[in-house]
Image: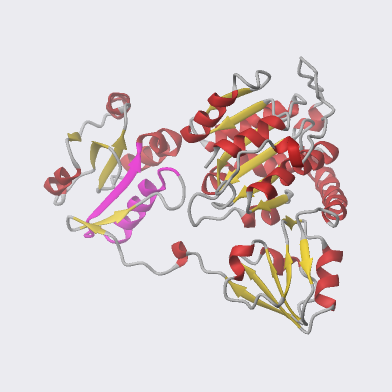
Amino acid sequence: MHEEITRVLVENEARLVYATNRAVEKGLQALQDEFRRFHYELCTNEKIAYELALAGAYASKRTVCFISSEGLYEALDPLMSSAYTGAVGGLLVVCVQENDVEATPVGLFAKLPFIVADSIDAFRSAVPFGYKISEKYETPVIIQATPETASNSDHRSSTIEHPVSASPDAGRAFARFARDPNRWAATPKFRYQLHRELNEKIEKIRKEFEEYEGNHAAIKTQTGVITDRLSHLEFYDEDGSILRLATLYPLPDRLVSGFIDQMDVVFVEETYPVIKLQIADRSKVHANRIRASYGKEKPEEMMYGMRVVRDKLGPASSINMAHGIKKLEPRKKVLAITYEDFFFHSGIPAFVNTLYNDSRYVLLIMTNKRENELKGMLKGFGFENCHHLDNASGIEKFKDADALTVLFCRGII
C-alpha cells in the first residue's frame, strides 16, 4: 500500500522522511538506490517523527512526517504549536487512514491546511501542490491518504502526469537555519502576533484552494451533494450534482457558495462536520453524517471475567483508564492491555501514578523484544509483581488478583 506513496514523495524532492510504520520503511529502502539524495528514519512514536520533520523544515529542507491518521492525534502537541511557528522548508504531514479513524477534524482544529487524496492520481496532484503551499506560506500541510489511495496503482512515475515543481531548496547541499528566537518560539508574548499572522495566512491559502484541480464540481440537477470523497456517494443517484472537495481546510468559500447557489437543496456527506462548520449560509444545507464503525455502541469486552480496557485514547491510555475505573468501582475486575512501545511512549508516568495511588488491577503488556528492559524499569520503581506468560491463556490464573499485577506476553491480542 505504501510503496507508490513513498515514491511520489521522493520524486517530489522530499529530502527527509520520518515514519513510524515498518511497511513505510520497506518502501523507502527500495528507493534508496534510485534516489540517493534523501534520508529517512523509522521513529519510536508519532510525536518524535513530527518533531524531527518539523526540525528539518526549520532548517529549510523539504520534509515529510509519514504516519497513520490515528497516529496524527498522538502528535497533536508539536502539531498545534507548528501552526504558529510555521516552517521555512516544505513540510508535508502524510497520514494514511489505516482504519476507521479519520484525521479530517485536525485541519480545522489546528488551523493547518488539509487535503484529502482518495486515489493515487489525487495524491500525485496533492504532493507538489502541498509543497507549493507549505513553502509559499511557511506552514505544515496535512494530506490524508485514504485506503483507496494506493489501490489499483499502475506504479507509474508521478513525474509523467504531474511535473515536479522545483523547490527554493532544490540542489542545495547544506541546510540553512535562521537563528531568530522571535520566529521559532511561540511564547505567550508573541502568541497574539502569531495568531494574527496565522489568520491572514489561512485566508491567502483559502484563495489558492479555490483553483486547486482536485476540487471537482459536476452540475446536473438542482439537488446537490458536497463530499470529501467519492466513496460517500454510494446511496445517491449518479445523475445528481456533485461537488467533491479535496481541500477541506480552509474551505474554498467561493467555490462552495457558488455550487450551493445553483441548488435547491444540498446534502453534505462527511464523517465529521468539517465542511458543514465552515459554510456560512446553511439554509439549503442538510448534513448526513457518515458514521464510522468505531463510533457505534459496542458490548463491553470481557476476558476471563475481567473487563478489558484498551488504548482507545492514546498510547498506554488503558493504564489511566483502568486506574480510574478501579477508583470508581473498586470491586470490578479490570484487565488493561497495552504494548511495550506504548508503555515507553506514555505509560511510565501513568504507571507511577497507579503505584502512588495504590490502584489494583491487572496490566498486560504485549511484548516483542523489550521485556527485560520493562522488568528492569519496574524493579527500579520498587515493583516486582510481574510475570511472564507463554500464551494469553495464562491470564486466567490472575483474574482474582487483589494487587496490582503486570503480565508480559509476546504477540498481539
Q: Residue furthest bottom?
A: 264
On screen, 307 above or below 11?
below
Judge by depth and name the residue closer to the eye, 376 or 49: 49
On screen, 239 above or below 243?
below
Q: Quadrant of residue 48?
A: top right
On screen, 25 above or below 235?
above
Identify the residue at horizontal 79%, vertical 27% (top origin).
Answer: 181
Q: Is residue 223 left or right of residue 180?
A: left
**Residue 374, percent from left and from top:** 31, 28
Judge by depth and name the residue closer to the eye, 30 or 157: 157
**Magenta segment: does it hold 334?**
yes
Q: Is residue 155 left or right of residue 45?
A: right
Q: Is residue 75 visible?
A: yes
Identify the residue at horizontal 40%, vertical 34% (top origin).
Answer: 341
**Residue 263, percent from left and from top:** 80, 80
Identify the residue at horizontal 33%, vertical 53% (top origin).
Answer: 309
Q: Residue furthest left?
A: 397
**Residue 142, percent from left and from top:** 68, 46
Judge by depth and name the residue closer to the eye, 332 or 122: 122
**Magenta segment: does it hold 202?**
no
Identify the residue at horizontal 75%, vertical 33% (top origin).
Answer: 185
Judge by depth and name the residue closer to the eye, 346 or 129: 129
**Residue 343, percent from left and from top:** 39, 36
